Amino acid sequence: MLSRVKNEKQQSARSAALVIAEKRGEIEKINLRLQKLLDSFLDEIIDRFSESKSGRTWQNESKLHPLAQAMVTRIDSFVTRMDGNSNFEQI
């Protein structure tokens, strides 16, 4: 009887370990997808910001996501502060 309980406990532990490993793999795939989406989103925002600073205007600015608009505002204020800072070394 005790050996049966011990075997069931071991089987349960192996089963749980397999499920955990599977879920970790799924989470890793989701994290990679999220990172790719974030990277492409930020690249687009940086490109648009660079275009606006080079004299071009934002196209379809009203269609920007509110988060993107907030990020652009923060980037603009940061660049403005750095331009005014005489101790700031450009790379």
Image (spheres, helix red, strand yellow):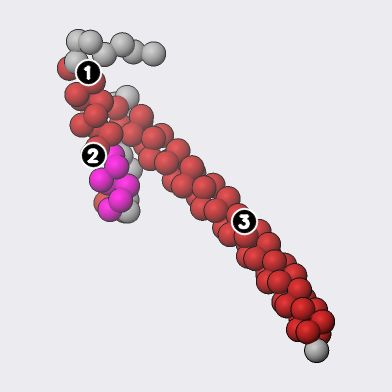
Question: Which amino acid type is marked by label 1?
Answer: Asp
Range drawn in magenta: 66-72
Secondary structure under badge 2? helix
* Tag of residue 42: none
Say which of marks 3 and 1 sits in front. 3
- Circle 1 residue: 83
Query: Can you give x and y, in whole percent of width and height, for residue 86 in the image?
Result: 20, 10
Q: Main secondary structure of the magenta part?
A: helix
Q: Earlier in the sequence, mark 3 or mark 1?
A: 3
On screen, residue 80 above or below 1: above
* Tag of residue 29: 3
Question: Which amino acid type is marked by label 3?
Answer: Lys
Secondary structure under badge 3? helix
Q: Residue at x 66, y 59 (%)?
A: 25
On screen, residue 42 above or below 19: above
Secondary structure under badge 1? helix
Q: Residues within 10 Å of mark 1 (few under 14, many from 20)?
A: few
Question: Which amino acid type is marked by label 2?
Answer: Thr
Query: Can you give x and y, in whole percent of width and height, for residue 54 in the image?
Result: 32, 24
- Circle 2 residue: 73
Tell me the distance, in whole angstroms, between the alpha carbons under discs 3 and 1. Answer: 40 Å
Q: Residue at x 29, y 42 (%)?
A: 71
Q: Residue 72 or 23: which is nearer the viewer? A: 23
Q: Residue at x 46, y 47 (%)?
A: 38
Tell me the distance, in whole angstroms, between the alpha carbons under discs 1 and 2. Answer: 15 Å
Q: Residue at x 23, y 20 (%)?
A: 82
The image quarter containing residue 27 is bottom right
Apparent side of residue 57 relative to residue 41 in the rendered image (left or right): left
Query: Can you give x and y, in whole percent of width and height, for residue 85 in the image?
Result: 19, 15
Query: Can you give x and y, in whole percent of width and height, for residue 15 in the image?
Result: 73, 73
Visible in this render: residue 11?
Answer: yes
